[in-house]
Image: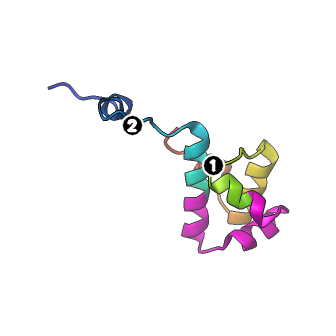
Amino acid sequence: MSPQTLEEFLAKLRISPPSTVERVARNIASARITAGKSVQEVAARAGMEADDLASIEAGARRASGTQLVNIAEALDVLVDRFFIGI
């Protein structure tokens, strides 16, 4: 049996792999949770509304490049942390 990619495995199960937006969203949420910070705290430090950050973490909307940099700075991480697994 040959090894298969995650995408091939998910296709066999008829499950769509997460989109790039979903992966970035999960990575932002993961970084925030790991840092032990609330949505409100990170949003305030990033100069944005908590509802906007919550929407980004939920994958309901995309973050701009500037927002990604501001969120990373608020979490004291490098912005590439949000692109792990992509």
Residue ID for mark 1? 59
User: Which span is picked out in magenta?
Assistant: 29-52
The residue closer to the viewer here, 4 or 17, is 17
Asked if the magenta segment contains residue 81, the reply would be no
The residue lying toward the viewer, choosing from 77 and 2, is 2
Residue 7's place in the image compared with 70, above or below, is above
User: Can the viewer see residue 72 in this picture?
Assistant: no
The structure residue drawn at horizontal position 73% and vertical position 59%, both measured from the top left corner, is 53
Q: Is residue 43 visible?
A: yes
The residue positioned 73% from the left and 50% from the top of the image is 68
The disc, 2 or 1, on the residue closer to the chain's N-terminal end is 2
Q: CA distance from mark 2 to mark 1?
A: 18 Å
Question: Please, what is the dominant secondary structure of the magenta stretch?
Answer: helix
Q: Residue furthest front?
A: 14
Q: Is residue 3 above or below residue 28?
A: above
Within 10 Å of the Cα at label 1, are there few (<14), some (14-19), or many (20+) other Cα atoms? some
Q: Amino acid at mark 2?
A: Ile
Where residue 67 appears, as percent x and y from the top left, is: 78, 51
Residue 70, position in %: x, y? 78, 56
Residue found 52% across the figure and 38% down from its top: 86
What residue did someone put label 2 on? 15
Q: Indicate the secondary structure of the residue bearing disc 2.
A: loop
